[in-house]
Image: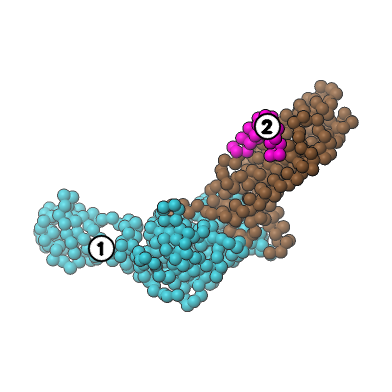
Chain colours: A cyan, B brown
Amino acid sequence: MSAPTPGVAGAPATAPVVSLAQGADLTIEVRHVARWYGNVVAVNDVSFGLGAGVTGLLGPNGAGKTTLLHMLAGFLAPSAGEILIRGRHPGRDPSVYRDIGLVPEREAVYPFLTGFEYVRFNARLQGLPRPGEAARDAIARVGLSDAADRAVGTYSKGMRQRVKVAGALVHDPRILLLDEPFNGMDPRQRLSMMELLGVMAEEGRTILFSSHILEEVERVGNQILVMVSGRLAASGDYRAIRALMTDRPHTILLRSSDDRALARALLGDPAVFAVELTSEGLSVRTAHLSVFRRLIAGVARGAGVRLTEVIPGDESLESVFDYLVRR
Amino acid sequence: MSLSIRVAILFEIMRVTVRQLLGRRRTLLLLLLSALPILLAVVFRAAGEVSVNRFTRSAFDTVDMTILLPLVAILFGSGAFGAEADDGTLVYLLAKPVPRWVVVMAKAASATLMAIALTGTSTAIAGLIGLVPGGGDGVAATEAMVLAVVVGSACYACLFLAVSLFTRRALVIGIGYMLVWEGALSLLLPGIANLSIRQYALGAASAIFKLPIESSRLSAETAFILAAVLLVVSLVIATWRLMRFELPGGTD
């Protein structure tokens, strides 16, 4: 299996299989997987391999992250391609769940059970020899011991997320799949959950979690998979991908006392590669946003122009993802 | 996975399912409904001598067999998986190394036992008050009535448990079946006795005592065979459905 990391897959006819694992120790293998619903393609020719470590699955809403996680967990059959979890096909044999801990995005079921009862239920269904003990340990790991004897229905959203994680890791699985695990958590809970994922990865587990927030992913995952419109748009070390995202061309709208004079002055600067006079103001394209921000005031002053407004262009995550796909 | 672990898992799922079913407000309503046959028996007894003939027709057939049994068993059967299959939370149960048939058996057993606990107890107490003191066939008739609701509970619960894995409207379909198929059509078309749980229940009861209910058409042997076929088919279909359970991919 080749390892072109980091990389931006774009939209090739057949995506390469990107291995984010060290060596050949792959616990999750995804080979040219696609899933469609009628004419709608949710996941399109995605390939990657994962080993021990934390990997963030990043993408805007509707990118296909949940569909991919559900396929990895064996609860959705791929329309094409193949998924192997430690060499086995998920979905065909329930024994695969000895190796998988799954934390779906949906809220915990059975609100009438206490946190402890819920986690022990998971432990018993895993056939663990000492389910009570395992449940207490798992609850302690997620920092819920104080609330273990309260009904799950009385928990806050963050606490419910944590009790779901406790239920998913009670059997000490090799693979942990988490769908938007930080949703509803306050910053302190988020930090402790991030630390927990880091520790579990150091213990040799393969952890894949989805998020639509770049900051979450870069704080936990040392490697990321970026999905956009069902495709794997980028994969590899988050720093390299972050650089790709920040160095992309930006469009900035300027309003000043003399747009035409400012346009002339800006065209001489290497950080600017296009200017356009519009009815809204002066539209400027730059490849280096941070450099441009530093120089704009000086350029305006030098041209004798008074800047009245600097409006950044579309900075949404979606526009960043769109850029990655177009590359 | 050893048999003892499977049995332990079965009981664990049953324990949680029973708590899930007991926690519903509608269970309280069913509990009140199940008091109705007992109240009727008290009224019959207070009015004087009660014949097996009159009691089974006016109380047992009208209330237990036509309303209480189907309603209770359909509600528990269709509610055993609750909204789990519909909203995807079933994943918490299925992301476990547990054979799907164990999950189905646990859910079906929970729903059936809950239905029997309610309808069986109610029918037994009603018989003890209304029929047994009168002597004669009172004891045999009471036993036959209890057997009818036991067989009926299992059939209704398992059938509508399977239906609930296909549609969120299992309860509506169940009530439609109860009112239209068993209520109206079976009177007009005697031939559908072979496809009526009510007939299986009454037929099975005749193994103990032939209850004087005119609409009962099946022999005990036929009723037991058809009930067993229905149970097996329902459980097999439910297991098949769970093996193919897919989480909604959603928009994400």
Using the image as rendered, state which of residue A213 and residue A24 is in the foreground.
Answer: A24
Left or right, A69 with reference to A153? left
Assign the C terminus of chain A to one quadrant of the image: bottom left
Range covered by the magenta-colored residues = B172-196
Q: CA distance from mark 1 to mark 2?
A: 76 Å
Residue B41: percent from the left, percent from the top?
A: 79, 28
Helix, strand or loop for disc 2 = loop
Q: Residue furthest right?
A: B136
The picture quadrant where one finds residue A306 is bottom left
Magenta run includes residue B114: no
Which secondary structure is most common in the magenta stretch? helix
Residue at coordinates 67% horizontally, 55% vertically from top-left?
A: B102
Which of the two marks, 1 or 2, is nearer to us in this view?
2
Helix, strand or loop for disc 1 = loop
Seen in the picture, residue A13 relative to B105 is either above or below; the reply is below
Residue at coordinates 47% horizontally, 76% vertically from top-left?
A: A22
Residue under numbered circle 2: B189
Assign the N terminus of chain A to one quadrant of the image: bottom left
Q: Chain of mark 2?
A: B
Residue B247: percent from the left, percent from the top?
A: 52, 54
> Which three-letter amino acid code belongs to the residue tagged 1?
Pro
The picture quadrant where one finds residue A243 is bottom left
> Which three-letter amino acid code belongs to the residue tagged 2?
Leu
Judge the density around disc 1: few (<14), some (14-19), many (≥20) Cα neighbours within 10 Å.
some
Residue under numbered circle 1: A249
